[in-house]
Image (spheres, coloured by chain):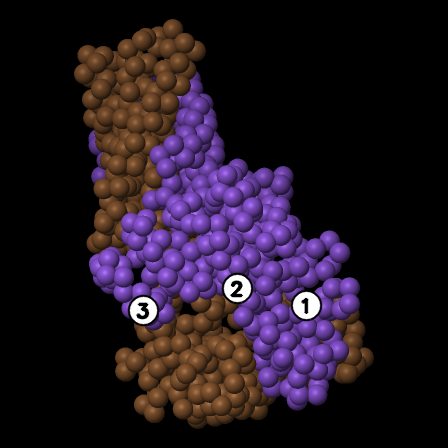
Chain colours: A brown, B purple
Amino acid sequence: MSSLLPELIKEKKVLLIREIFDEYNIVDLSEIFSELELDEAIFIFKILPKDISAELFTYLDPLHQERLISALSSMEVKGILDNMFSDDIIDFLEEMPANVIKYILDNVPSEHRKEINTLLSYEENTAGSVMSTDFVELYEKDTVEEAIIKIKEQAEIAETVNVCFVIDQKRVLVGIVNLRDIIVAKNNKLISEIMDKNIHYVYTNTDQEEVARLLSKYDLTTICVLNDQNCLIGIVTADDVLDILNEEATEDIHKMSGIVPTDGSYLKTGIKEMVKSRISWLLILMISATFTGYILQYFEDKLSALAILSASIPIIMSTAGNAGAQSSTMVIRGIAVDDLNIKDIFIVLKKELAVGLLCGAILFVTNFIRLYIFGSKSTTFSISFVVSLTITISLISANLAGGILPLIAKKLKMDPASAAAPLITTIVDATSLIIYFMLAIAILKI
Amino acid sequence: MSSLLPELIKEKKVLLIREIFDEYNIVDLSEIFSELELDEAIFIFKILPKDISAELFTYLDPLHQERLISALSSMEVKGILDNMFSDDIIDFLEEMPANVIKYILDNVPSEHRKEINTLLSYEENTAGSVMSTDFVELYEKDTVEEAIIKIKEQAEIAETVNVCFVIDQKRVLVGIVNLRDIIVAKNNKLISEIMDKNIHYVYTNTDQEEVARLLSKYDLTTICVLNDQNCLIGIVTADDVLDILNEEATEDIHKMSGIVPTDGSYLKTGIKEMVKSRISWLLILMISATFTGYILQYFEDKLSALAILSASIPIIMSTAGNAGAQSSTMVIRGIAVDDLNIKDIFIVLKKELAVGLLCGAILFVTNFIRLYIFGSKSTTFSISFVVSLTITISLISANLAGGILPLIAKKLKMDPASAAAPLITTIVDATSLIIYFMLAIAILKI
């Protein structure tokens, strides 16, 4: 189909194009649309019904949105904005440069502008910045019959009608009612009789991750967003949160590998942005690795006295590093999904100690066999013993450090993923080297 | 409230307890309920209306579910099962030991049993295993008025009525219709006139991650699950997928740190299970680290000729390891969210090369200053140069390896997260050591 569109545009087959955009999925169409030349894109935009072109616009990436906005007349821009949901307008504006934002705000009707300005004022990644202000409001005293009329009136512009919100005269939220319950109820019942007073809500400044967590924990399809006066000003729906969860998981994964999170996808992130997101941790970790270097230098004479010892350094450091990464990863993820917090620190300690002892014992045996039986002749019984014991002890301490540090970071209001994960390997590297040399000095008398 | 319940139970305040369970959120109540003694729990279960006790049961963890099932009479078990949605029954059964499953299947009515058996036969993590079979079905020839009557009839047992499914005589899905559109339409309109033929569907064996991806990509609240004959047999809703997305992200994060994914949360995973999930990669990586040891051993005489070289080994290995982790993390996550695939390999290569060159240059300068200006006297100009150049070259190769290996793993139908991530550090360690000694031999003539 992607090769078909330019053909149809050239032949000005307006009706056929409209039919295509009516028939096929808009998300798929937006991908094809993105490959068109600018004049072709504008042609399509002008011939489509306003609601479809607005929806199409919503799914374009920021680059194409900006290109189109600059090419369309202000009347056309107005037409698109009028047909977009408020949260989609915000998503789009947040990606635009300042001059485009100004141009757009100049072109929206004043009541719409006020709403957009308010939404834009919420900090990024808060409930306020992702909420939609298009929802159905009902009053307690409405009957089911009146409610259905209101829903019919508001259905066109509301993002969802599946849940309706019941407010009192002061716009304070007093209950929610599912469309399902309205449909099933008798016509003369009052909304106050069928509404649910047990409301789940967040405030405009609640972190979007917390919003996602609540929706997921309570199996909700919608959650209310209140302002400081407890007035209902927006809603967040479960399908909006899917993207948020994906974004947050990506952020956490990136942080744990020492990458400062960037906004876009891999393909859309520029070289400069990528360097910026990676270089700070590379530098910090490089500098902190010098301490490990100092430790090696400090024990240099011991090392040269028994050169065979240096061959085992990589295996000790990498095993301890891996063990630390395993435990810190499990704990950091546990914190992220709200399964762990500081009060669990002793359970974590106990568990990591037990796991460390067991894994340590298995690795001790494996490594001892590897060194003493399959190793070179110069690897004596006591050298094999020292290396294997070092692996076990440093594995246990790595497990403990990996388990505790993220919890402490969380307690100190730092982000466990960026504060703890990248540093653990470095801490563990240094610790395990010191353990190694201590044991070597004590047992091998070097 | 948690201390209140046992009191109320002791005093047999049945009405008050029912009121509490009516008033408060069932998820919060389930947490309090989990802390009760078994006999208290059973008392509450018996006095609650069946639909509430069924919902409460859904939110208990497997341990409490099993305890309760064994203590309740078969009639009571039947009552609970009758009031649970089919997908919740499956979630619960999947966690139960074989004898409990048999006991339950013996106690459900035969038509229910058939449905459960079918659902249980779908492989874990497929659409079939997470779908719900409770949804509203309409026919094309139904009028809006008839449809509303059907919806009222089915509303009690359906998981969602917000989207209804239009099937023909052979149960083949021909369209979907939103409750919103039914409400707005005139009473005598036909469902076929207002339904949407553009249906999003998956098959029972589609991976749940793909289901989540489609819901998120197309901003859907519901997706249809079809069998091989294209008949509608279930639905998956966006709120079900929130949990799936969280689980999948946890799995990926665990795999990237060399942990074989386990089912439960940190607190619920036993010691034995934890050791099992961690030990295999610890062993594999320990063995593979011996190669790094061999490289060190091979160059032992060079090292002792210029002992200062060994002090820089940790910094080289850790910097290259970090760079490799950064690039592989970005690419693995890009693959997971469907942003990258094998056809992008040259874009990834180009980008990683550019990023590597820039980061490498910055680290070269920083490191050279650190060594030559602030380092010990024995660190000559050429030693500083060799160490810094090694860091740059091994950083670039780590970036390239981290970028390519996950894509190759994906191409070979292996899981990028478990196949590539844990191994990259080891590969990068060995490579950077070889680069180090090669450069040292060439430039320092040792």
Separation (CA) of disc 1 from disc 2: 16 Å
First of labels 1, 2 by sequence position: 1
Marks 1 and 3: same chain? Answer: yes
One can see residue A93 in this view: no
Q: Is residue B231 left or right of residue A163?
A: right
Q: CA distance from mark 2 to mark 3?
A: 36 Å
- Which residue is depicted at the point 33% across and 61% down? B29
Q: Position of residue B389 (x, y in %)?
A: 40, 37
Q: Which residue is mark 3?
A: B15
Q: Residues within 10 Å of mark 3 (few under 14, many from 20)?
A: few
Residue A190 location (% of width, % of height): 44, 88
- Image location (x, y in percent) of residue A141: 40, 91
Looking at the rendered structure, the secondary structure element under dot 2 is helix
**Circle 1 — which element?**
loop
Amino acid of disc 2: Ala
As drawn, is B17 to the left or to the right of A444? right
- Place of residue A128 in the rendered image (x, y in percent of width and height, measured from the top left): 37, 75
Few, some or many residues within 10 Å of mark 1 (<14, 14–19, 20+): some
Give the numbered dot on residue A180.
Answer: none
> Please, what is the three-letter code of the amino acid marked with disc 1?
Ile
Q: Residues within 10 Å of mark 2 (few under 14, many from 20)?
A: many
Residue pointed to by mark 2: B238
In terms of secondary structure, where does tag 3 sit? helix
The residue at 42%/80% (across/down) is A195
Residue B123 sits in quarter: top right
The N terminus of chain B: image quadrant: bottom left
> Residue under mark 3: which chain is it in?
B
Sequence order check: which comes first, mark 1 or mark 3?
A: 3
Kindly identify which residue carries mark 1.
Answer: B199
